[in-house]
């Protein structure tokens, strides 16, 4: 199938594309936080490279978060607009799911902690136990919003089992998380959810018979209120 995957949940802007002929292409722009300026040119470049037109797509996949507010709005809006214009469905997956799967694809097993930097000295995180087959995962700590010290405390209460921490949040707060016995933050990769992993997961969903949803039902997973609303609430309380 012809599928495009859009990744904008973190500072990175990524697009991955596969065609029914097996051609794959991917582009990622990291560290600039220019989601609006980068996404459309990246998509256009990939379509040109593989000789595909938007009208040839069969489905659109997107990272729905949690992550940066602006990035999520840009990515989800682009996915919904593209899908609505073409009469297609959308496959929405979370940034924590994608990070966990990326760790599995890199060969990691056991406890995998996916951590996305949420700003305001907080992180979005989820802990899963990945079985030896690499396909079965059991949720150990449900996705949530944590202060790094609180997340470290939760991990410490689990005991000494080895935990691999991936994602930009794990790298930013490596000193805090790394103080927990058994926790190892990955510093040389997996800093953001890879668009290629999102693409692979979307393909798996389709092969398993999981249908894309109507674009109208796709919404960003923020997991907390926007900065502007939070600041307004603080002013009102003052």
Image (cartoon, rainbow, N blue to C red):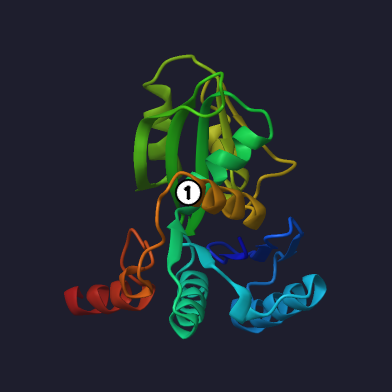
User: In the depicted view, which residue is nearer to us: 207 or 28?
Assistant: 207
Q: Is residue 82 visible?
A: yes
Q: Position of residue 188 (x, y in %)?
A: 75, 41
**In the rendered image, which quarter contains the N terminus?**
bottom right
- Figure check: 195 above or below 87: above
User: In the depicted view, which residue is nearer to us: 193 or 144?
Assistant: 193
Q: Residue at horizontal 45%, vertical 70%?
A: 69
Q: Residues within 10 Å of mark 1 (few under 14, many from 20)?
A: some
Query: Residue most toward the front?
Result: 21
Q: Is residue 120 visible?
A: no
Q: Residue at horizontal 67%, vertical 28%?
A: 107
Residue under numbered circle 1: 205
Q: Position of residue 167 (x, y in %)?
A: 59, 46
* Left or right: where 223 falls relative to 170: left
* Left or right: where 131 falls relative to 57: left
* Left or right: where 2 falls relative to 217: right
User: In the depicted view, which residue is nearer to us: 172 or 12?
Assistant: 12
Give the structural element (helix, strand or loop) at label 1. helix
């Amino acid at each position: 199938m012809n599928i495009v995957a859009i990744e904008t949940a973190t500072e990175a802007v990524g697009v991955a594309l596969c065609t029914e002929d097996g051609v794959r292409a991917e582009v990622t722009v990291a560290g600039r936080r220019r989601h609006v300026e980068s996404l459309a040119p990246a998509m256009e470049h990939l379509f040109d490279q593989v000789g595909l037109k938007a009208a040839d797509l069969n489905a659109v996949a997107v990272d729905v978060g949690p992550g940066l507010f602006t990035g999520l709005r840009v990515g989800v809006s682009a996915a919904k607009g593209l899908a609505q214009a073409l009469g297609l469905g959308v496959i929405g997956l979370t940034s924590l799911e994608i990070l966990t799967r990326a760790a599995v694809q890199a060969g990691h097993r056991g406890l995998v902690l996916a951590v996305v930097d949420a700003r305001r000295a907080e992180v979005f995180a989820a802990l899963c136990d990945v079985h030896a087959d690499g396909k079965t995962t059991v949720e150990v700590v449900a996705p949530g919003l944590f202060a790094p010290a609180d997340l470290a405390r939760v991990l410490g209460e689990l005991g000494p089992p080895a935990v691999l921490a991936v994602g930009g949040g794990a790298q930013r707060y490596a000193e805090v998380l790394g103080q927990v016995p058994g926790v190892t933050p990955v510093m040389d990769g997996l800093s953001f959810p890879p668009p290629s992993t999102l693409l692979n997961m979307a393909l798996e969903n389709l092969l398993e018979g999981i249908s894309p949803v109507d674009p109208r039902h796709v919404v960003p997973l923020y997991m907390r209120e926007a900065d502007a609303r939070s600041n307004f609430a603080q002013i009102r309380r003052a």
